[in-house]
Amino acid sequence: MSDLQVTAGHILVLRLFDIAYATDLAKVETLWSTHTTGRTSRSKLTATPPKAMAFGVAPLSVELDPVTLPLDLLPPGWPPVEAVVTARLYDFGAVSLALRVNTPNLAWDEYIKLLNAVDRAVGPSSGTRIWEKMLAHLRQVLGAALVKPTPSTVAEDYLIGVVQEFDARFTAAEVLQRVDLVPLLSGEQRQLSDGARADLLRQRFSYYVDDLVVLTWDRAFIYEPHGDSDVADVLEVANAQLLQMRYYDELLDDELPRMYDLVEATRSRLNLFAARRYAELARKLYTLVAEVTELTEKVDNALQVTEDVYLARIYGAALDLYRVPTVSRAVNRKLAIIRDTYSALYDEASSRSSQMMEAAILVLIMVEVVLAFLRHGS
C-alpha cells in the first residue's frame, strides 16, 4: 500500500481502427466544421523541436461529445465518471479514438482502482458498443473524405496512466520506491512472481531525474511533471503502425489463397485467350502490390526521428514491444511472393503471346502458299 496522493493526472484509453485505404485530411477539416461544432487541430509534438522528431504527415484531431462511462465496478457512491473524447485521423486510413478521464485528488491505490475500472468499462473485454457508436458517427460525417472505406474489424487497444503531480515532488527513482506500478501495468489483483514483476518493469525510461515512462504490451505509465504529451503521442503512433501492419498482413493472408486459385484456374484453360487472362491477372497482382507498398511506406514514415534520442528510444522500444518489425517483415515476405507470382505470370503471358504470334505467322505463310498454289493451278 502507498500513502501517496495523485493530485494531478488522467487516464487515457486508446482504441484504433482501420477505416479506409487513405483519408483526405483537408476534406476532413471542411466536413467536420460543416456538420459539427467540434474543433479540429493538426497534431504536433509539444515539447520536441520539429527538426528532432515530427509526424510525416501531421494527423488531424477532432473533438467528439464527451461520454459518461458505465463504471459499475467502482465502490458504491462513486460519482459518474465523464471522459473527454477525441479522434485522431491519419492520412494512411487509421483513426485513433481516445477517452481521457481526468482524475480527481486520489490516493495511489484509488487511482489504480479507477484505472482498472475504466479498463473494464471500455477496454478489450468490455465489448465494443461505445466505440462502434463513435466510429459510426465519424463514418457518417466524414464518409466523403475516406478513400476506399474498409469494413475491417482489426483494432488495437492501449491504456495509459498519466501522473503530472503527486502530493510532493519526487524523482523517478523515488516513485519506483514509493509506489507499486505492477497492479497498474498488469491489471492483476493477485500477487505476481518476481520474474513477472521484473518483466513488467523492464522497459522503463527517464530523461530528467523527475520523469518516468514504463511500457508494457498493452499498458503504460507516464510520470511527467512538466505536462507535455509527446510520449503518449509517440505511443499512439506506434500502435497505429501496428494496426496498419496487422491489417495488411491479414489482407495478404486472404489474397494469397485467392491468387493461387486464380493462377491454377488460368493455367487450366488452354485456349486462345490464355495469354490475355495471364496478363489481366498479372495486372491485378501488380495493382495490389503497388497499393500495399504505397501504404506501408506511409505507415513506416508516420513519425520521422532525427535528433531526439530519448523519444527515439521510447519509440523504438514501443515498436519492438508491439512486434511491429515482425509483422512488417511478414507483410514484406507475402508481398515478395506476390511480386514473384506477378513476374512469372507476366513471363507466361509474354510466352503465350509469342507462341500465338508464331502460330499466326505460320498460318499466314500456309495461306499464302495455298493461294499461290491455287493461282498457279488456274
Image (spheres, rainbow, N blue to C red):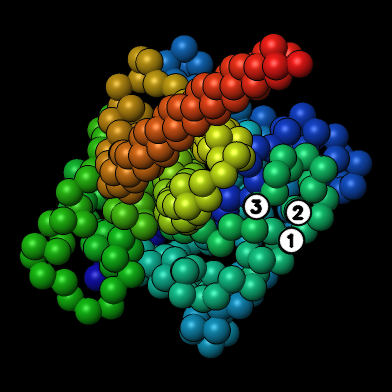
- Residue at the disc numbered 1: 136
Q: Which mark is residue 139?
A: 2
**Percent x, y for residue 266?**
51, 48
Q: Above or below — where is 30 with respect to 330?
A: above
Mark 3 to mark 2 CA distance (whole Å)? 11 Å
Element carrying mark 1: helix
Q: Sequence-wise, which precedes: disc 1 or disc 3?
A: 1
User: Relative to the observer, which residue lies in front, 364 or 227?
Assistant: 364
- Residue at the disc numbered 3: 150
Local crowd at mark 1 within 10 Å, few (<14), some, or many (≥20)? few
**Amino acid at pointer 3:** Thr
Between disc 3 and disc 2, the foreground one is 3
Asked whether residue 263 appears in the rendered view, the answer is no
Residue depicted at x 61% and y 78%: 70
**Percent x, y for residue 288?**
54, 38
Q: Are marks 1 and 3 in contact (CB under 8 Å)?
A: no
